[in-house]
Amino acid sequence: PETCPGRARTMCEMIETDRLTLRRITLADAPRITECITDPRIHRMVASIAPNQSVERTREWIATHKAGADRDTNHIFALQKGEDLVGVIGADRPGAGLAFDIGYWLIPAEWGAGLMTEAASAVQEWLMGRGERAFTSGHFADNPASGQVLKKIGFLPSGRGRVFSLGRGEASDHINMSFIA
Protein backbone atom coordinates (compact mmCIF):
# COMPACT_ATOMS: atom_id res chain seq x y z
CA PRO A 1 0.00 0.00 0.00
CA GLU A 2 0.98 3.57 -0.63
CA THR A 3 2.23 5.62 2.32
CA CYS A 4 0.41 8.87 2.97
CA PRO A 5 1.86 11.61 5.20
CA GLY A 6 1.57 15.00 3.57
CA ARG A 7 -0.70 13.75 0.80
CA ALA A 8 -4.10 15.40 0.44
CA ARG A 9 -6.05 12.14 0.43
CA THR A 10 -9.19 11.19 2.28
CA MET A 11 -8.22 7.53 2.65
CA CYS A 12 -4.79 6.51 3.82
CA GLU A 13 -3.90 2.84 3.99
CA MET A 14 -0.49 3.08 5.64
CA ILE A 15 1.75 5.61 7.35
CA GLU A 16 5.38 4.78 8.04
CA THR A 17 7.48 6.32 10.79
CA ASP A 18 11.06 5.59 11.83
CA ARG A 19 10.02 2.64 14.01
CA LEU A 20 6.39 1.90 13.19
CA THR A 21 4.01 1.12 10.40
CA LEU A 22 0.54 2.49 10.97
CA ARG A 23 -1.87 0.42 8.89
CA ARG A 24 -5.60 -0.04 8.64
CA ILE A 25 -6.93 -2.65 11.05
CA THR A 26 -8.33 -5.88 9.61
CA LEU A 27 -10.70 -8.46 11.08
CA ALA A 28 -7.68 -10.75 11.49
CA ASP A 29 -6.40 -8.29 14.14
CA ALA A 30 -9.42 -8.81 16.40
CA PRO A 31 -7.92 -11.59 18.60
CA ARG A 32 -4.67 -9.65 19.18
CA ILE A 33 -6.44 -6.37 19.90
CA THR A 34 -8.83 -8.10 22.29
CA GLU A 35 -5.91 -9.81 24.05
CA CYS A 36 -4.18 -6.45 24.53
CA ILE A 37 -7.18 -4.53 25.80
CA THR A 38 -8.01 -7.09 28.48
CA ASP A 39 -5.05 -5.59 30.37
CA PRO A 40 -6.53 -3.14 32.90
CA ARG A 41 -3.58 -0.81 32.33
CA ILE A 42 -5.11 -0.28 28.87
CA HIS A 43 -8.89 -0.54 29.22
CA ARG A 44 -8.98 1.64 32.35
CA MET A 45 -7.34 4.50 30.44
CA VAL A 46 -9.61 4.41 27.35
CA ALA A 47 -13.19 5.54 27.95
CA SER A 48 -14.77 3.29 25.32
CA ILE A 49 -13.21 -0.12 26.08
CA ALA A 50 -15.06 -2.51 28.37
CA PRO A 51 -12.92 -4.67 30.68
CA ASN A 52 -14.42 -7.88 29.32
CA GLN A 53 -14.65 -7.01 25.63
CA SER A 54 -15.07 -10.09 23.45
CA VAL A 55 -13.34 -10.87 20.17
CA GLU A 56 -16.79 -10.65 18.55
CA ARG A 57 -17.31 -7.12 19.89
CA THR A 58 -13.85 -6.17 18.61
CA ARG A 59 -14.78 -7.55 15.17
CA GLU A 60 -18.01 -5.50 15.22
CA TRP A 61 -15.96 -2.38 15.98
CA ILE A 62 -13.49 -3.14 13.18
CA ALA A 63 -16.37 -3.66 10.73
CA THR A 64 -17.35 0.02 11.19
CA HIS A 65 -13.96 1.38 10.13
CA LYS A 66 -14.33 1.38 6.35
CA ALA A 67 -17.61 3.30 6.40
CA GLY A 68 -16.12 5.82 8.82
CA ALA A 69 -13.06 6.29 6.64
CA ASP A 70 -15.25 6.66 3.54
CA ARG A 71 -17.28 9.39 5.34
CA ASP A 72 -14.02 10.95 6.57
CA THR A 73 -15.20 10.71 10.16
CA ASN A 74 -13.11 7.82 11.46
CA HIS A 75 -9.52 6.85 10.65
CA ILE A 76 -8.18 4.00 12.80
CA PHE A 77 -4.70 2.48 12.51
CA ALA A 78 -2.91 -0.48 14.06
CA LEU A 79 0.59 0.32 15.29
CA GLN A 80 2.83 -2.35 13.88
CA LYS A 81 6.37 -2.69 15.26
CA GLY A 82 8.11 -5.30 13.17
CA GLU A 83 5.65 -8.18 13.05
CA ASP A 84 3.84 -7.19 16.26
CA LEU A 85 0.68 -5.15 16.71
CA VAL A 86 1.60 -3.01 19.73
CA GLY A 87 -1.21 -0.47 19.83
CA VAL A 88 -3.99 1.41 18.10
CA ILE A 89 -4.45 5.07 17.23
CA GLY A 90 -7.47 6.75 15.75
CA ALA A 91 -8.90 10.08 14.76
CA ASP A 92 -12.66 10.42 14.75
CA ARG A 93 -15.24 13.17 14.57
CA PRO A 94 -19.02 13.35 14.57
CA GLY A 95 -19.21 14.89 11.11
CA ALA A 96 -17.18 16.25 8.20
CA GLY A 97 -15.74 19.69 8.85
CA LEU A 98 -15.52 19.22 12.62
CA ALA A 99 -12.31 18.73 14.61
CA PHE A 100 -10.88 15.23 14.81
CA ASP A 101 -10.51 13.73 18.28
CA ILE A 102 -7.31 11.67 18.59
CA GLY A 103 -7.29 8.61 20.84
CA TYR A 104 -4.81 5.80 21.35
CA TRP A 105 -3.44 2.97 23.43
CA LEU A 106 -0.11 1.14 23.52
CA ILE A 107 0.86 -2.14 25.16
CA PRO A 108 2.68 -1.56 28.47
CA ALA A 109 5.85 -3.34 27.28
CA GLU A 110 6.35 -0.43 24.84
CA TRP A 111 5.60 2.44 27.25
CA GLY A 112 8.26 5.11 27.72
CA ALA A 113 10.03 4.65 24.39
CA GLY A 114 8.33 7.50 22.52
CA LEU A 115 6.41 5.23 20.16
CA MET A 116 3.03 6.81 20.82
CA THR A 117 4.42 10.30 20.35
CA GLU A 118 5.84 9.12 17.02
CA ALA A 119 2.51 7.60 15.97
CA ALA A 120 0.39 10.56 17.13
CA SER A 121 2.67 13.00 15.36
CA ALA A 122 2.41 10.97 12.13
CA VAL A 123 -1.39 10.88 12.23
CA GLN A 124 -1.55 14.59 13.03
CA GLU A 125 0.88 15.34 10.16
CA TRP A 126 -1.19 13.27 7.72
CA LEU A 127 -4.42 15.01 8.74
CA MET A 128 -2.82 18.46 8.59
CA GLY A 129 -1.50 17.60 5.12
CA ARG A 130 -5.15 17.19 4.14
CA GLY A 131 -5.99 20.64 5.49
CA GLU A 132 -7.18 19.80 9.02
CA ARG A 133 -6.22 22.49 11.52
CA ALA A 134 -8.02 21.72 14.79
CA PHE A 135 -7.82 18.61 16.97
CA THR A 136 -9.09 17.53 20.36
CA SER A 137 -8.02 14.79 22.71
CA GLY A 138 -7.66 14.21 26.40
CA HIS A 139 -6.56 11.86 29.13
CA PHE A 140 -7.67 10.69 32.52
CA ALA A 141 -6.02 12.70 35.28
CA ASP A 142 -4.30 9.59 36.63
CA ASN A 143 -2.63 9.01 33.24
CA PRO A 144 -0.23 11.97 32.92
CA ALA A 145 1.99 10.05 30.46
CA SER A 146 -0.80 10.29 27.89
CA GLY A 147 -0.94 14.03 28.49
CA GLN A 148 2.80 14.24 27.84
CA VAL A 149 2.32 12.57 24.44
CA LEU A 150 -0.22 15.23 23.53
CA LYS A 151 1.94 18.10 24.84
CA LYS A 152 4.87 16.87 22.75
CA ILE A 153 2.79 17.25 19.57
CA GLY A 154 1.53 20.71 20.48
CA PHE A 155 -1.71 20.12 22.39
CA LEU A 156 -2.58 22.38 25.31
CA PRO A 157 -4.95 21.76 28.23
CA SER A 158 -8.38 23.20 27.41
CA GLY A 159 -10.57 22.13 30.29
CA ARG A 160 -11.32 19.53 32.87
CA GLY A 161 -14.35 17.39 33.56
CA ARG A 162 -15.56 13.92 34.36
CA VAL A 163 -15.77 11.27 31.65
CA PHE A 164 -17.41 7.88 32.03
CA SER A 165 -14.99 4.99 31.42
CA LEU A 166 -16.38 1.58 30.52
CA GLY A 167 -13.13 0.03 31.75
CA ARG A 168 -13.48 1.65 35.16
CA GLY A 169 -17.24 1.42 35.36
CA GLU A 170 -17.47 5.01 36.60
CA ALA A 171 -16.83 8.62 35.67
CA SER A 172 -13.31 9.83 36.36
CA ASP A 173 -11.45 13.14 36.30
CA HIS A 174 -10.43 13.93 32.70
CA ILE A 175 -8.14 16.58 31.22
CA ASN A 176 -9.35 17.92 27.85
CA MET A 177 -6.68 19.03 25.41
CA SER A 178 -6.79 20.88 22.09
CA PHE A 179 -4.54 21.78 19.18
CA ILE A 180 -5.17 24.56 16.67
CA ALA A 181 -2.67 25.18 13.88
Image (cartoon, rainbow, N blue to C red):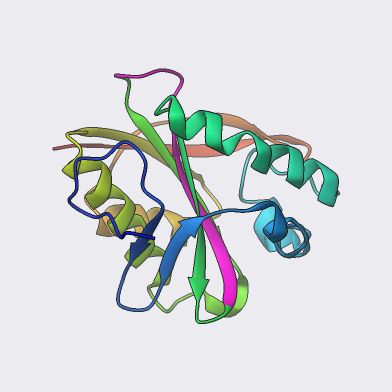
- Looking at this view, name the residue that lies furthest to the left: 181
Image side of residue 25 versus residue 19, left or right: right
Q: Nearer the viewer, residue 146 or 27?
A: 27
Task: Judge whether 165 appears above or below 114 on screen.
Answer: above
- The x and y percentages for residue 60 are 75, 38
| Part of the protein shown in magenta | 84-97
Whether residue 168 is visible to the viewer of this picture, yes or no, is no
* Residue shown at the point (47%, 45%) measured from the top left: 90
Residue 42 within the segment the image draws in magenta:
no
Q: Nearer the viewer, residue 50 or 80?
A: 80
* Residue shown at the point (33%, 51%) measured from the top left: 123
Whether residue 116 is visible to the viewer of this picture, yes or no, is yes
- The x and y percentages for residue 128 are 20, 42
Quadrant for residue 177, please give it.
top left
Task: Judge whether 160 appears above or below 103 on screen.
Answer: above
* Residue shown at the point (54%, 29%) measured from the top left: 67
Image side of residue 117 versus residue 27, left or right: left
How many labels, in total?
0
- Looking at this view, name the residue that lies furthest to the front: 1
> Main SS type for the magenta part?
strand
Quarter of the image with the N terminus is bottom left
- The x and y percentages for residue 11 are 37, 41
Task: Judge whether 90 appears above or below 84 on screen.
Answer: above
Quarter of the image with the C terminus is top left
Task: Judge whether 104 appears above or below 86 on screen.
Answer: above
* Residue shown at the point (23%, 55%) measured from the top left: 5
Residue 86 within the segment the image draws in magenta:
yes
